[in-house]
Amino acid sequence: MVTSIEHINGMISDLRLQPVDFNKLFNGRKSLTPLESVELFLKEELQLKIDKQNRSRQRNAKLPYTKTIAAFDFGFQRSVTKEQMLQLSDMTWVEQAYNICFLGPPGVGKTHLAISLAVEGLNKGYVVAFETLENLIKILKTCEITTSSRRRLKYLQKATLIVIDEVGFMPLDATEANLFFSFISAMSEKTSLIITSNKGFDEWADFLGDQTITTAILDRLVHHCEIINMTGNSYRLEHHKSITS
Ligand code: ADP
Ligand code: MG
């Protein structure tokens, strides 16, 4: 049997396996038995496949940026403790489809903490997705006519954890509020949601436009939910950087 690296690489490509650097893989391991060689090759393929899936999960999560719990100043923001966040970062709550709501005024760190937990979820191998409410509504409105929205909705439906950021920033009309309700309802008990909102629950009817739909949404959302009310000053305003000083 004539073995050539081109032939092997051709089969790797036909089988849709990942390209392997054989020189690196077998370097210093010249005395392997045939079975050990096959095992080493398959282990490498498995690892490359896992790496590829991880990269694709990271990309598809569409986090706007990365934030960590380690980088959060719990001395500045005292409504939530580091212990609380570290406990939540074990991510066991996603197995029971619990939700988390970060509520509070702008700049207090709601999105930062939501993204930190999304990052923890990604690191633990979960399918995670991030959307602003505005974008989520856009997806729900256009999923029947736009391929990209249909694909994204499918991804959201298979996610274990979805961050819905900036709930309450824009008022919803009746159709949009109904779409939001249907989405929350479809996710409840199945998918964990992290919601950030600049409005307290008692103000949600203002932007949802209707008390009945608000009650129905909150009823599903808070059934299994950790509610973190954040107060205090805006970190942005207190730590603003100027160009000249
Ligand atoms: P919110 O979503 O509540 O409006 P963000 O989470 O977007 O606020 O925070 C605004 C900016 O300030 C971000 O860059 C965030 O990383 C930073 N920030 C907010 N609170 C803290 C904090 N306690 N420690 C460190 N950075 C913070
Ligand atoms: Mg925010």
Image (cartoon, grey):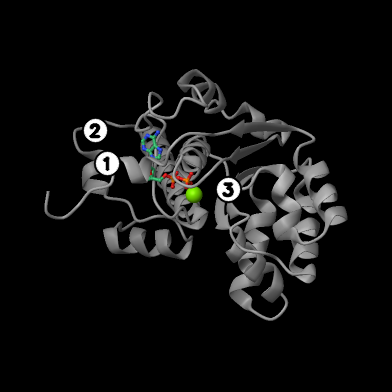
Front of the two marks 1 and 2: 1
| Label 1 C-beta lies within 8 Å of the nearest ligand 1 atom | no
What residue is at 40 percent from the left and 47 percent from the top? Answer: 48
Callout 3 secondary element: loop
Q: Nearer the viewer, mark 1 or mark 3?
A: 3
For disc 3, does the CB lie below 8 Å from ligand 1?
yes
Q: Going 23% across and 48% down the picture, which residue do you hit? A: 241
Rendered image quadrant of residue 132: bottom right
The quadrant of the picture occupied by the N terminus is bottom left
Amino acid type of the residue tagged 1 in the rendering: Leu
Residue 200, image x, y percentages: 66, 43
The answer to which image quadrant residue 166 occupies is bottom right
Q: Nearer the viewer, residue 79 or 67?
A: 79
Q: Which mark is residue 198?
A: 3
Task: Check whether the beta carbons of the residues at disc 1 and disc 2 lie within 8 A of each other.
Answer: yes
Residue 42 falls left or right of residue 144: left
Q: Residues within 10 Å of mark 1 (few under 14, many from 20)?
A: few
Q: Residue at x 32, y 51 (%)?
A: 20
The image's mark for residue 140 is none
Secondary structure beneath disc 2?
loop
> Residue tagged by mark 1?
25
> Which badge, 1 or 3, is on the more N-terminal residue?
1
Q: CA distance from mark 1 to mark 3?
A: 52 Å
Q: Position of residue 173 (x, y in %)?
A: 74, 69
Quick check: 210 above or below 124?
A: below
Q: Tell me which amino acid carries mark 3.
A: Asn
The residue to which callout 2 is attached is 29
Count of numbered marks? 3
Answer whether labels 3 and 2 touch (C-beta < 8 Å): no
Which one is in front, 141 or 96?
Answer: 141
Q: How far separated are the C-alphas under marks 1 and 2?
A: 8 Å
Q: Amino acid at mark 2?
A: Arg
